Amino acid sequence: MWPCNRPGARLVLPESNSAIVALEVSPEVITRLQAVKVIGAIRAGRLRLACHLYNTEGDIEQALGALARA
């Protein structure tokens, strides 16, 4: 498992080679992510976030910050 090391975060994911994360979240979380310009997609009722080379640590911190307030 890969725990997020951000203080207060509760995100724990299975170890994987994929940069794609799919999470069950409430509509309020999606609104918060949109407010901080985090772009994701809803697929099969889950929020799908995909990180790539062009994403910065700041981008990930923004997403984790919005998710941590869930």
Image (cartoon, rainbow, N blue to C red):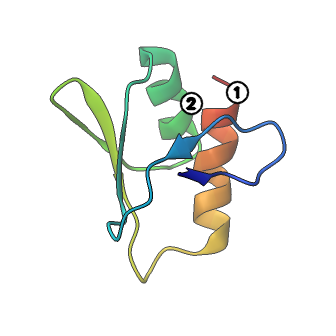
State the residue at coordinates (59%, 60%): 60
Q: Please tell me which residue lies in front, 4 or 46.
A: 4
Residue 22 position in % (x across, y down): 33, 41
Which mark is on residue 32?
Answer: 2
In the rendered image, which quarter is residue 20 located in?
bottom left
Q: Please tell me which residue lies in front, 5 or 64.
A: 5
Q: What kind of element bears circle 2?
A: helix
Point out the frontmost of discs 2 and 1: 1
Which residue is under mark 1?
69
- Give the CA distance from mark 2 to mark 1: 9 Å
Q: What kind of element bears circle 1?
A: loop
Specify the amino acid type for callout 1.
Arg
Q: State yes or no: discs 2 and 1 in contact (Cβ < 8 Å).
A: yes
Q: Count all numbered tags in the image, as a single digit.
A: 2
Q: Is residue 42 left or right of residue 25?
A: left
Q: Residue furthest left?
A: 44
Query: Mark 1 or mark 2, which is nearer the start of the sequence?
Result: 2
Residue 5 position in % (x across, y down): 75, 54
The relative height of residue 27 versus residue 52 in the rendered view (above or below) is above
